[in-house]
């Protein structure tokens, strides 16, 4: 143990969780989920043993959808779906639906680890035009609009709003307004305001800001459904899920329930996405300030204009200090700080469930650690 | 309220759950899952915020697999996978893997509602030979071996061991030993002993006997992987899940954890599948006796030799009495007794998590209800 001053720590039975995902969820939601496993209030049944066709569960799905619509001010021309398979299955379902058998290519941005996973899945289904790649530059920045080599008439444009691994986030909507714009918002959905009406399809797995692993939210504009080819496997055809209100087969009841609780918390406790965004900005600002004022002891990974408010990736002066930092932080109650297994370094993820107090405590630990070890780094 | 004698009820905060699925899970598992949402013992983190790449979660997956191997005496030539998408996604993944581009048809049994869902998904991928259908007879019995019109050399034979909706269960392994035998055991997996080595692939979604909705177990013999065609979507290629030990992308951590707890309970508390089967036989026998001794007030749906030990489907003398039975049972604390929405009537599901005491209580209620209403039925 480092003997961090107790004042730097936040009292909780749990560690402070800065995991890249599955990430921290608010305490009040964890408590409600825990209780519902014993008995769903008023139902006399465990959440794990209640029918997905019960009126109670239909109400859960309806409330989750209604809360999302309210939070995003989402038009009725979008369907809201709760699916399985994570972002990875969407990497396939989207080109199966919108690229298979089509004449034009799909345009993809290659901005980091996760967009790099989406591209080969699209290539199975048709032509893909990579309109920009940051690979040669080591994914340390995002492109300007003028750098994108967009196709004349692509079937759609796909990008990822926040690259979780590298800590890069677009602070604008990408691409021309006439394009079918598709965005993977898995790691920043509901963390800030968005103009949902500028997207044809938005998807986000839950395990960052939205709920537990096991459910993925898809917002799809109704006109896209007309482009879906015949004879897709039933589970991979968005139209089946639309027709059955996300209960085509047995859905992940538990994960959808927790997602509903999160949307309720965002709406009623946090006070909407503007308030959430304000808090998330304050959290990220506090942490980046700690990095920037460290006289180079902590070095941010991303170019400053493209820094993510969700995932703060940084390194210490030596590989050994990176490891020591993560280990000692964990021993002091700061969990999940190891960088992604492909990249190393340190990553602090500041999802909605992470409090400002937790970030303050982490910054205190970082200052303390720097004081302790900066001589070694000289 | 009917005023059922209190002695007929079992003391619990929850209702007694006879739902067709998601079904009842044992109290001790619900309590452990509830606790882990607040904090995974010894980890200082919520189950919902713990990394799927943590050593802790790898241990969970390994224990779930080891327990399944022990319970089933499963040979090392099988892989054990934990996937998303339910039985329905397996309806597609199996023919995509083993029928697409192949010369011979796949043989399918059509024994009820769920096998009827599997067949059109296979037809998208290749030729299907329905070797027997109970549709014209209203799915009230299962075929004898001699009735199956099996192909000369099918790519595989697919059947469902227990038809959840109709309450029909095979009490034998179906088909010739030289065939690639594939079985959907979603509603009776781990409820009885099986000779796993006689199957090439077994799959079962969790929400009957195995855990909560959101995870599906697949046991696949290694030689089948060689038949999988190139260029399947990554999430639908069994080989990716094998290669990554079921952590190809973020898996449904919560559902897998609960499934591990169930396998631990079966192994350590119940004492294995022989003991579980003995208990399940006693439960079903008790309920079928109540039906058979009711002088026709309760009429079982399935032919006696094909009666399911898991799902007991029956009807009362009138449609009105069916409805009244389900409503009054629910008011008395017996939940989930309505028959499947496509069939009506009554269905009591006796999954592993349902106790003999719960079945005794239900039988008591049934006797009481019959006494009360048999005059009306005359």
Image (cartoon, coloured by chain):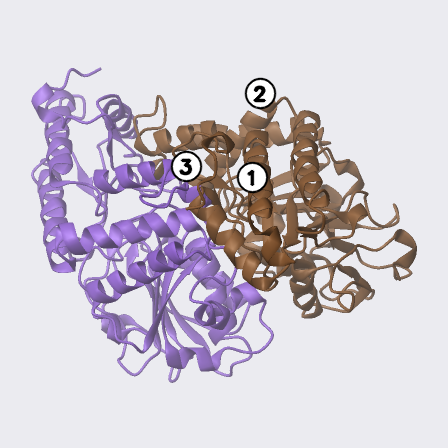
Chain colours: A brown, B purple
| Residue pictured at 42% horizontal, 36% vertical | A53
Q: Is residue B44 left or right of residue A124?
A: left
Kindly tell me whether residue B339 is visible in this rendering.
Answer: no
- Label 1 – label 3 distance at C-alpha: 15 Å
Q: Quadrant of residue B235?
A: bottom right
> Given the image, what chain letter belongs to the residue carrying mark 2?
A
> Given the image, what chain letter belongs to the residue carrying mark 3?
A
Residue located beneath label 3 in the image: A14
Residue located beneath label 2 in the image: A268
Q: How many marks?
A: 3
Closer to the N terminus: mark 3 or mark 2? 3
Instruction: Give the image location of residue B158, x and y in percent.
Output: 37, 69
Residue A362 shows which numbered tag? Answer: 1
Q: Is residue B190 left or right of residue A251?
A: left
**Which element is circle 1 on?**
helix
| For discs 1 and 3, the disc positioned in front in the rendered view | 1
Instruction: Give the image location of residue A302, x and y in percent.
Output: 74, 53
Q: Is residue B246 above or below residue B324?
A: below
- Label 1 – label 2 distance at C-alpha: 28 Å
| Residue pictured at 72% horizontal, 28% vertical | A73
């Amino acid at each position: 143990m480092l003997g961090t001053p107790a004042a730097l720590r936040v009292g909780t039975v749990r560690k402070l969780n800065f995991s890249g995902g599955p990430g921290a969820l608010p305490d009040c939601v964890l408590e409600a989920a825990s209780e519902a496993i014993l008995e769903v209030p008023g139902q006399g049944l465990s959440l794990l043993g209640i029918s997905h066709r019960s009126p109670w569960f239909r109400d859960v799905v309806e409330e989750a959808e209604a809360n999302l619509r309210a939070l995003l001010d989402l038009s009725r021309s979008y369907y809201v779906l709760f699916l399985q398979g994570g972002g990875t299955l969407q990497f396939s379902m989207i080109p199966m639906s919108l690229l298979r058998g089509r004449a034009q290519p799909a345009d993809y941005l290659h901005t980091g680890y996760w967009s790099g996973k989406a591209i080969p899945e699209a290539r199975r289904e048709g032509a893909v035009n990579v309109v920009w790649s940051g690979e040669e530059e080591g994914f340390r920045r995002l492109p300007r609009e003028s750098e994108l080599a967009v196709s004349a008439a692509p079937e759609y444009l796909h990008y990822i709003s926040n690259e979780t691994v590298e800590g890069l986030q677009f602070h604008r909507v990408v691409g021309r307004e006439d394009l079918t714009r598709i965005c993977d918002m898995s790691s920043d959905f509901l963390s800030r305001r968005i103009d949902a009406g500028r997207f044809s399809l938005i998807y986000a797995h839950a395990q960052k800001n939205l709920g537990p692993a096991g459910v993925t939210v898809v917002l799809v504009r109704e006109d896209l459904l007309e482009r879906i080819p015949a004879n897709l496997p039933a589970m991979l055809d968005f139209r089946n899920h639309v027709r059955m209100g996300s209960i085509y087969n047995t859905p992940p009841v538990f994960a959808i329930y927790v997602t509903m609780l999160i949307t309720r918390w965002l709406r009623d406790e946090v006070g909407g996405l503007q308030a959430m965004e304000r808090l998330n900005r304050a959290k990220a600002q506090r942490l980046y300030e700690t990095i920037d004022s460290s006289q180079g002891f902590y070095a941010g990974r991303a170019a400053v204009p493209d820094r993510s408010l969700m995932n703060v990736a940084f390194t210490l002066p030596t590989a050994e200090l990176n490891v020591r930092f993560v280990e000692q932080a964990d021993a002091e109650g700061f969990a999940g700080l190891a960088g992604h297994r492909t990249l190393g370094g340190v990553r602090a993820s500041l999802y909605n469930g992470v409090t400002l107090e937790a970030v303050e405590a982490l910054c205190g630990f970082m200052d303390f650690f720097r004081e302790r070890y900066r001589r070694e780094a000289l």
